[in-house]
Image: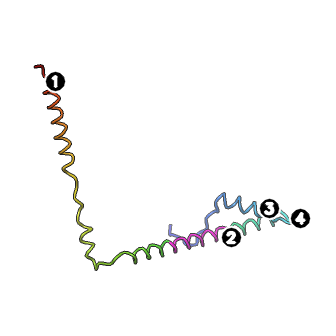
Amino acid sequence: MAYNKHRKTAPSPETREEADRIARATQRPGQTKEQTRLISQGIQKGIEEYKKQHKARARAADKAKKQQLRQQQPDDGGQNDEQDALPEPTRAWLPWLLLALSWTGFALYWWWQQPG
């Protein structure tokens, strides 16, 4: 199935409840249930449109923030890329040191425990 940009999705239950609550709160005397339902649907569409606009603004703000961060970083002309590619020195000596210390400790303990 092809992606349809304009496909309609059902509004969330929270959006429906909020729209129904607002429609009932603004209901006029003598207004039919059908009219209230139509008002509620209009409010739902308004809420959905607001959410879409809010998401678009948030994306634009995030994009601008990332762009600003990229501009603030110093540009070395690509020299920094080579340094980033090198691995950081590891602490490979630490496990070996701990192993040697533990074996030395075991040997000293065994030597002190010998009767003698």
Q: CA distance from mark 1 to mark 4?
A: 98 Å
| Residue bearing the label numbered 1 | 113
Instruction: Name the chief secondary structure element in magenta.
Output: helix
Across and down, in percent, residue 78 comes to 27, 77
| Residue bearing the label numbered 4 | 29
Horizontally, residue 22 falls left or right of residue 11, namely right
Which quadrant would the C terminus be assigned to in this image? top left
> Is residue 48 located in the magenta-colored stretch of the structure?
yes
Q: What mark, if any, has residue 24 been given in the picture?
A: 3
Q: CA distance from mark 2 to mark 1?
A: 83 Å
* Labels 2 and 3 touching (C-beta < 8 A): no
Residue positioned most to the bottom: 77
Classify mark 4: helix, strand or loop.
Answer: loop
Please give the range of residues in magenta.
Answer: 45-61
Locate residue 34: give its quadrant: bottom right
> Is residue 47 located in the magenta-colored stretch of the structure?
yes
Type of the residue with mark 1: Gln
Q: Disc 1 or disc 4, which is closer to the eye?
A: 1
Type of the residue with mark 2: Gly
Identify the mark nearer the N-term, 3 or 1: 3
* Labels 1 and 4 touching (C-beta < 8 A): no
Type of the residue with mark 3: Arg
| Residue bearing the label numbered 2 | 46
Q: Disc 3 or disc 1, which is closer to the eye?
A: 1
